[in-house]
Amino acid sequence: MFRFTIRDVLWLTLVAAVATCWYIDHRGLGVLSGRVTVIELKLRTAEAAAQSSEARLGMESQKVASLAAKNRKLEYNLRQAKR
């Protein structure tokens, strides 16, 4: 029959505690890695949407500037016609 001393039981407890902590930490890293991947994907999607919106905003501002120029020209022509 095996005979264990208190020192042997304490070492076994220490090894079991370290192994348990390592396992819990290692398992948590996998979950965090998955979350980071999802967040990165959402960030890329948001950046693409922002760039698309920015491009559309640029085009719309060009249209507004063009319409404003046409409006000024028409107003000028109208004033010239009234004279």
Image: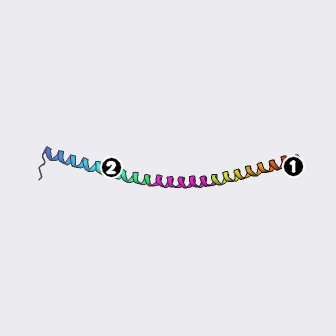
- What span is colored magenta in the figure? 37-56
Badge 1: how crowded within 10 Å, few (<14), some, or many (20+)? few
Q: As drawn, is 19 to the left or to the right of 62? A: left
**Residue 53: in magenta span:** yes
Residue 16, numbered label: none
Describe the element under mark 1 as helix, strand or loop: helix
Rendered residue at 76%/52% (across/down)? 70
**Residue bearing the label numbered 1:** 81
Describe the element under mark 2 as helix, strand or loop: helix
Rendered residue at 29%/50% (across/down)? 22
Badge 2: how crowded within 10 Å, few (<14), some, or many (20+)? few
**Residue bearing the label numbered 2:** 25
Q: Identify residue type, mark 1.
A: Ala
Rendered residue at 74%/50% (across/down)? 69
Q: Earlier in the sequence, mark 1 or mark 2?
A: 2
Q: Could you say which is closer to the camera, residue 10 or residue 54?
A: 54
Instruction: Give the main secondary structure of the magenta stretch.
Output: helix
